[in-house]
């Protein structure tokens, strides 16, 4: 899961970094570093993210595909 995908998940839920961090049980600073690519998402944190937001492989793939479409200009 890429940093941009994690950010897109947070934004899709309309959450601030503080709210997202609270739901995941971590600090806002950690969320910031993960979204910037300064820290990797640990296996434990990934599992927590998938559990809290009910994400499975198909949902994650769809989010990544949509992100690519927006970045690729297909929706402009």
Image (tube, rainbow, N blue to C red):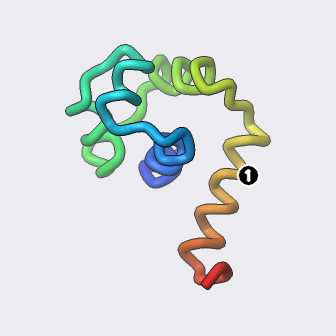
Observer-nearest of 67 and 16: 16
Give the position of the C terminus as an image quadrant.
bottom right
Q: Is residue 57 above or below residue 63?
A: above
Judge left or right: residue 35 versus residue 14. left
Q: Secondary structure at mark 1?
A: helix
Image-quadrant location for residue 32 = top left
> Which residue is at a point 35% across and 46% down the rendered structure image?
35
Q: Residues within 10 Å of mark 1 (few under 14, many from 20)?
A: few
* 46 or 67, nearer to the observer: 67
| Image quadrant in which you'd find residue 56 | top right
Q: Residue at x 54, y 39 (%)?
A: 13
- Name the spot of residue 31 as percent of width and height, x first: 32, 35
In this rendering, is residue 34 above or below 49?
A: below
Who is closer to the viewer here, 19 or 46?
Answer: 19
Q: Position of residue 72 (x, y in %)?
A: 59, 79
Residue 52, relative to residue 13: is it above or below?
above
Q: Residue most toward the left?
A: 29
Left or right position of 31 against 54: left
Q: Residue at x 43, y 20 (%)?
A: 24
**Which residue corresponds to the image point at 29% horizontal and 51% vertical from the top-left?**
36
Residue labelled with disc 1: 62
- Find the residue positioned furthest to the front: 14
Residue 58 in picture, x, y percent from top left: 79, 41
| Number of numbered discs | 1
**Quarter occupied by residue 25:** top left
Instruction: State the quadrant of the N terminus.
Output: top right
- Residue farthest to the right, as pictured: 58
């Amino acid at each position: 899961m890429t940093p941009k995908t994690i950010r897109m998940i947070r934004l899709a839920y309309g959450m601030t970094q503080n709210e997202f961090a609270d739901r995941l049980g971590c600090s806002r600073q950690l969320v910031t570093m993960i979204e910037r690519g300064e820290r990797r998402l640990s296996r434990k944190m990934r599992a927590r993210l998938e559990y809290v937001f009910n994400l499975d492989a198909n949902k994650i793939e769809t989010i990544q595909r949509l992100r690519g479409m927006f970045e690729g200009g297909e929706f402009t």
